[in-house]
Image (cartoon, rainbow, N blue to C red):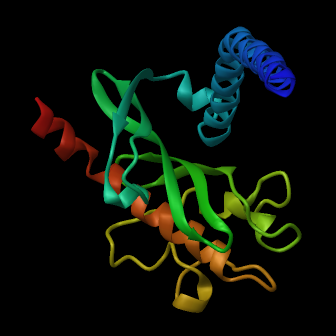
């Protein structure tokens, strides 16, 4: 009986600690979620300004959408910002995914005119090998800027491919999978962007 009371007392004490700890976690999460959300939005805004220079961006009106397409690399909803001039969409900025990176999915942001001319691309996040595959990151090298001003005509257009496949994009020394995954994702994303006028007309 004495042991039973001791076990009961210890269980009650542990339960109190568990409830208190859970309460602290919920409280901290509640207090920080808005600031984390604001920080993520701030980071996203910073990336948008990197792919579309302000002197271009400031000429347009922005509208935000959520879209999904297999061309964007997965089945998730993706953020799409359309820039309008005289009520006509001219530029798309869209989050996309390269699902076949060397160490997993690579998340990118692509900006292009709706005629297929690329304005800018940035890698939002990745887990590629440091010192080899991480050259896709603008903080490591300027490789990602090689896509600026390239044009994708259609899915048979080979310009936005690695040079080893007949395209215009250099691969890295010691790495092929990572730049190939990013290059393919950018090409697919621009093809999606070129189809946006058709998508908008179907949604009216």
Closer to the camera in the image, 183 or 29: 29
Task: Work out which quarter of the rendered image holds the N terminus and state it.
Answer: top right
Q: Is residue 32 above or below residue 153?
A: above
Residue 112: x and y in percent read: 46, 48
Residue shown at the point (79%, 65%) measured from the top left: 135
Taking the image as shown, residue 66 lies to the left or right of residue 124, namely left
The relative height of residue 17 versus residue 166 in the rendered view (above or below) is above
Task: Using the rendered view, name the quadrant where residue 18 is placed.
Answer: top right
Q: In x, y percent, where is residue 139?
A: 84, 51
- Whether residue 195 sits left or right of residue 157 in the image: it is left
Residue 7 can be seen in this image:
yes
The answer to which quarter of the image holds residue 175 is: bottom right
Splitting the image into 4 quarters, where does residue 164 fall? bottom right
Q: Nearer the viewer, residue 70 or 173?
A: 70
On the picture, is 13 further left or further right than 115?
A: right
Q: Residue at x 72, y 10 (%)?
A: 27
Q: Where is the C terminus found, in terms of image quarters?
A: top left
Q: How many marks?
A: 0
Residue 169 in sight in this render: no
User: Measured along the vertical axis of the image, is residue 85 above or below residue 169?
Assistant: above
- The residue at the point 49 percent across, 51 percent down is 96
Residue 91 appears at what percent x and percent y?
A: 42, 38
Residue 53: x and y, percent? 64, 34
Q: Nearer the viewer, residue 9 or 91?
A: 9
Residue shown at 45% from the left, 65% from the top? 187
């Amino acid at each position: 009986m004495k042991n039973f009371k001791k076990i009961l007392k210890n269980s009650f004490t542990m339960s109190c600690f568990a409830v208190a700890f859970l309460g602290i976690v919920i409280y901290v999460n509640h207090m920080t979620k808005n600031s984390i959300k604001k920080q993520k939005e701030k980071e996203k805004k910073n990336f948008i300004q990197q792919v579309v220079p302000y002197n271009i961006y400031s000429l347009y009106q922005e509208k935000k959408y959520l879209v999904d397409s297999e061309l964007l690399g997965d089945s998730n909803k993706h953020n799409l910002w359309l820039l309008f001039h005289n009520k006509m969409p001219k530029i798309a900025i869209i989050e996309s995914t390269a699902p076949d990176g060397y160490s997993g999915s690579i998340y990118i942001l692509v900006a292009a005119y709706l005629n297929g001319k690329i304005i800018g691309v940035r890698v939002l996040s990745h887990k590629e090998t440091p010192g080899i595959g991480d050259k896709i990151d603008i903080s490591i090298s300027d490789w990602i800027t090689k896509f600026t001003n390239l044009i994708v005509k259609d899915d048979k257009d080979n310009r936005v491919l690695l040079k080893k496949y007949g395209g215009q994009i250099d691969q890295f020394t010691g790495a092929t999978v990572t730049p190939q995954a990013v290059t393919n994702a950018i090409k697919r994303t621009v093809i999606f962007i070129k189809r946006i006028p058709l998508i908008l007309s179907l949604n009216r």
